[in-house]
Image (cartoon, grey):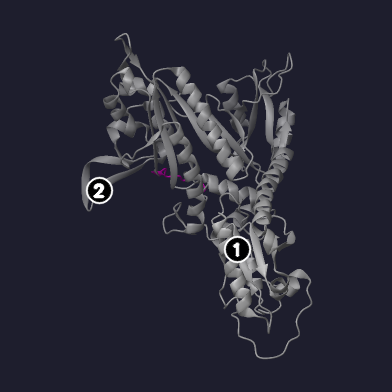
Amino acid sequence: MAVGEGKKSDARANSSGDKKPSSGGKKKEVKKETGLGLSNKKDENFGEWYSEVVVNGEMIEYYDISGCYILRPWAMSIWEEMHNFFDAEIKKMKIKNCYFPLFVSESVLQKEKNHIEGFAPEVAWVTKSGETPLEKQIAIRPTSETVMYPYYSKWIRGHRDLPLKLNQWCNVVRWEFSNPTPFIRSREFLWQEGHTAFATKAEADAEVLEILELYRRIYEEFLAVPIIKGKKSEHEKFAGGLYTTSVEAFIPNTGRGVQGATSHCLGQNFAKMFEINYEDERGEKQMVWQNSWAFTTRTIGVMVMVHGDDKGLVLPPKVASVQVIVIPVPYKDANTQGIFDACTATVDILCKAGFRAEADFRDNYSPGWKYSHWEMKGVPLRIEIGPKDLVNDQVRAVRRDNGAKLDISRANLIEQVKEMLDSIQQSLFNAAKQKRDTCIAVAKTWDEFMVALSQKKMILAPWCDEEEVEKDVKARTKGEMGAAKSLCSPFDQPELPEGIVCFASGKPAKKWTYWGRSY
């Protein structure tokens, strides 16, 4: 059915191949709606497509301050699903939630020089109260290490105070100036940030990987987005930290990597700066070992970019606010009330079985318009109920990911819906992984690297692990599309052949590293 078509009676007939009912008799007028579809194609104009799909899919609304966005309920519900999973998991690890203020004094913010240098260009400052200039300007947190650690110093005195493991769910502000993009790069975003302190490096190291595995699960098990777990280079690690691990996603359409989430071992650097010391069992003074880790609403943007298509959003069932939308399809002279009652009963059965299901009973939109509307919003499974379904005691289920249709007996409704939703979740991941994997190229020489980069690949290359060489790669690849940089050195390292040299310097290679352009 055409997107703006207003005929209520023939939507199901056209979509399912059923014979179109004969016309005649007075119809209830159904409002014509136009412009529901996307005007940009994902493969032709990705940036415009993305901007359009997050607005038309009711994920965000643009705000009157550039780089800031309103997160609508359709997006917030996805964030809540991830929040609920992650919050429960970290509580199993005995990590407790807290909340620290949004504001930080200039003197405290600048205490760790290397750390603040990494954020300095993006720090937003409060300089006035009404019309009165403040005696000292106050920063809005870009991250909370310097906000929290003076109090860790106060709270940690002896070995019995360790470990101290806190997390907060909050917003942060980083005043981005380059290409704000909803979810991916915004001036204010939501995140969780964990900050932990331990007596030993071994404990800190173990937690870094435990948290990173939770981030992998968020991407792969909930968002159906394949990632690569690895370690950041010295140049790309968290400013002031000892080392950084990350989960890296990839957007095939743009050929850009996305840092999906990070888990940092801060070592003892912040402990030294903020005097976070404790007395050990022998009565000797020691410094703590610290970690910090975070994931943000960027996760939602990655999911949209990976799965969305020319009809709109495609949501994985595990995070979809509505997993099943039930739509009545009442042909002329049909038992309309019977169809509506069957829709209500279907929703009730599904909700009681633990599914997130709703019915769309709006009478001023045609079934065809509703199909397009809920496809735009990415609902994983659509159930249609028309006169034939009523007679046969069945429903018709239509998958959002591939359009496949299946008539389901009402007696098997719960089992079949569960099976279909599980299949959609797995199929989305498999399709995304297959597409991502075709975008990975191995390059052993500079020439191979440049060819792969021009083809928008994520490049696995042998590297000497020298910071100056990495800076040189960035300088040599700078252009309109942006420079290439290291994304991560994967934990799952392929065998490094004897005598293999760095693709960029010709020096002996020490590891395999992923390279590419990034967001």
- The reply to whether residue 324 is visible in this rendering is yes
Q: Point out the stretch of residues depicted in magenta.
A: 171-179
For the residue pair 227 and 331, the one nearer the viewer reads as 331
Q: How many residues crowd around disc 1 within 10 Å: few (fewer than 14), some, or many (20 or more)?
A: many
Our reading of the magenta stretch's main secondary structure is: loop
Residue 453 picture location, percent across and down: 69, 36
Pointer 2: what residue? 128
| Residue type for callout 2 | Lys
| Residue type for callout 1 | Ile
Q: CA distance from mark 1 to mark 2?
A: 50 Å
Pointer 1: what residue? 325
Q: Quadrant of residue 455?
A: top right
Judge left or right: residue 196 versus residue 429.
Answer: left
For the residue pair 462 and 368, the one nearer the viewer reads as 368
Q: Residue at x 71, y 39 (%)?
A: 439
Q: How many residues crowd around disc 2 within 10 Å: few (fewer than 14), some, or many (20 or more)?
A: few
Q: Quadrant of the N terminus?
A: bottom right
For the residue pair 412 and 13, the one nearer the viewer reads as 412
Q: Residue at x 73, y 70 (%)?
A: 392
Q: With respect to residue 499, does 194 lie above or below?
A: below
Q: Quadrant of the C terminus?
A: top right
Judge left or right: residue 104 versus residue 31.
Answer: left
Q: Tell which circle, 1 or 2, labels the residue nearer the N-terminal end.
A: 2
